[in-house]
Image: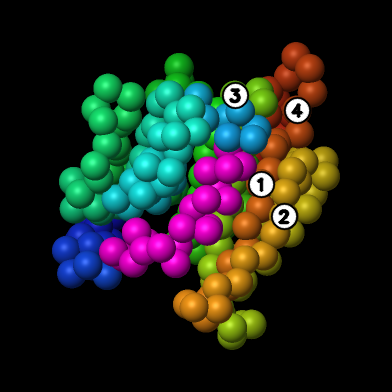
Amino acid sequence: MENLSDEWDRQYKAGRWHFLNDIKEAARYGILSAWLEQTATTRAVLDVGCGEATLYHYLKSSGLKQYCGIDLSEIALGNACVTKDCTWLVQSDLESFTPKPEDTFSAIVFNEVLYFCEEPELQLNRYAKFLEDDGVIAISMYTPAREKSGANRSIRKVWGETNNTDRWQVLDDLELKSYSKKADWKLRLVRPVRKPGKNFASLHPEVPGS
């Protein structure tokens, strides 16, 4: 993890990811924050791969109560302008992070981060165990033009997993095109399928860590 962390630190120090604060990213962040507001899931948000906590500022006006951001880059977390009373920031990679047993979240956001793990579909199921009963997962993934790219392979895994109606309810599913950036994204809002009196882990014991 140390080598990866150093590389992300170098990129943030060089301003490589500052474009995420640009107006041309606002529509995508607006969709993510509107989803959480409409589903009343801004009570406790886990932002996976939060970077400089850009999403936090979109959520502040949507009733955000608690915010946890995790990222590999110590520099990115240090640059985050957040209020200390309702937020905590954790340096961790996606695959290693596990919250305290007493911590659950009303929403989990995977914002341009699921490409960076080998089995994103398994991580979705692992993180679903950290949700409250009515919690949601919001996903945003950039779609390169090259069909055989690694990013598109990750997208197919994530969309294939969340198409499984035994595990997931798809609340919204859309594609976003930016003509000014010449970029496309796929976004999806999902909720794990649960049954009364049973949590996600008991319904799906085959999920790692259940």
Badge 2: how crowded within 10 Å, few (<14), some, or many (20+)? few
Residue at numbered disc 2: 173
| Outermost residue to the bottom | 146
Dot 4: element: loop
Question: Pointers 1 and 3 in contact (CB under 8 A)?
Answer: no
* Amino acid carrying mark 4 in the image: Arg
Marking on residue 189: 1
Residue 62 located left or right of residue 23:
right
Instruction: Name the quadrant containing residue 12.
Output: bottom left
Residue occupying image coordinates x 55% and y 73%: 178
Q: Quadrant of the C terminus?
A: top right
Dot 1: element: strand
* Amino acid carrying mark 2 in the image: Asp
Task: From the top left corner, tell me how far across and down residue 46 is, in percent.
Answer: 45, 36
**In terms of sequence position, does the residue under pointer 3 or pointer 4 come before the other?**
3
The label nearer to you, 4 versus 2, is: 2
**In terms of sequence position, does the residue under pointer 3 or pointer 2 come before the other?**
3
Marking on residue 132: 3
Question: Pointers 1 and 4 in contact (CB under 8 A)?
Answer: no
